[in-house]
Image (spheres, rainbow, N blue to C red):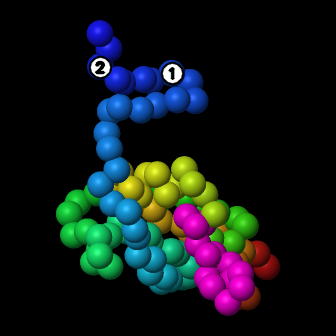
């Protein structure tokens, strides 16, 4: 008799079950203490278009190759392109994807000031 739980390399099931089937994406800038603004997508699990309002764990992805892109008139987030992130959302995780400094929609170095490369 087995419990139906499997936890081996590359396979994990039977410990939790999907609770959410959709998610809502919002975009904003995060201002760093040194003044640079980083572009971030915050993707939260939702039901019937309403964002879940409970505390949830967060997966933070600092991404150099564009957290979102346009395809056929739609904005696709990293979550739309990565099934493993979709699985985490369905299990109640919030996903935050940030464009690395100077990439995507994030700002780079300021031309003057204490953190400029000059």
In the rendered image, which quarter contains the N terminus? Answer: top left
Asked whether 82 or 94 is in front, the reply is 82
In the rendered image, which quarter contains the C terminus? Answer: bottom right
The residue shown at (56%, 24%) is 9
Circle 2 SS class: loop
The residue shown at (60%, 57%) is 82
Residue 47 shows in this picture: yes
Main SS, magenta region, reads strand
First in sequence, mark 1 or 2: give its number: 2
Rendered image quadrant of residue 110? bottom right
Q: What stretch is highlighted in magenta?
A: 68-80
Residue 7, how many percent across, how many down? Answer: 44, 24
User: Which residue is label 2 attached to?
Assistant: 3
The residue shown at (61%, 82%) is 75
Circle 1 SS class: strand
Outermost residue on the front side: it is: 1
Q: Is residue 56 left or right of residue 6?
A: left
Q: In this view, does 19 lie to the left or right of 95?
A: left
Outermost residue on the right side: it is: 118
Question: In the rendered image of this protein, does residue 15 appear above or below residue 83?
Answer: above
Q: How crowded is mark 2: few (under 14 residues within 10 Å), some or many (20 or more)?
A: few
Q: Is residue 50 left or right of residue 33?
A: left
Q: How crowded is mark 1: few (under 14 residues within 10 Å), some or many (20 or more)?
A: few
Q: Which mark is residue 8?
A: 1
Residue 109 lies within the magenta run? no
Asked whether 21 or 41 is in front, the reply is 21
């Amino acid at each position: 008799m087995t419990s139906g739980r499997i936890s081996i390399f590359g396979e994990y099931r039977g410990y939790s079950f999907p609770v959410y089937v959709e998610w809502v994406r919002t975009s904003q800038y995060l201002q760093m203490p040194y003044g640079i603004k980083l572009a971030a997508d915050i993707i939260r699990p939702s039901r019937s278009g309403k964002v879940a309002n409970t505390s949830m764990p967060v997966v933070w992805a600092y991404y150099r190759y564009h957290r979102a892109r346009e395809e056929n008139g739609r904005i696709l987030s990293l979550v739309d392109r990565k099934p493993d992130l979709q699985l985490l959302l369905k299990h109640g995780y919030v996903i935050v994807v940030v464009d690395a400094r100077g990439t995507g929609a994030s700002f780079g170095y300021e031309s003057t000031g204490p953190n400029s490369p000059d």
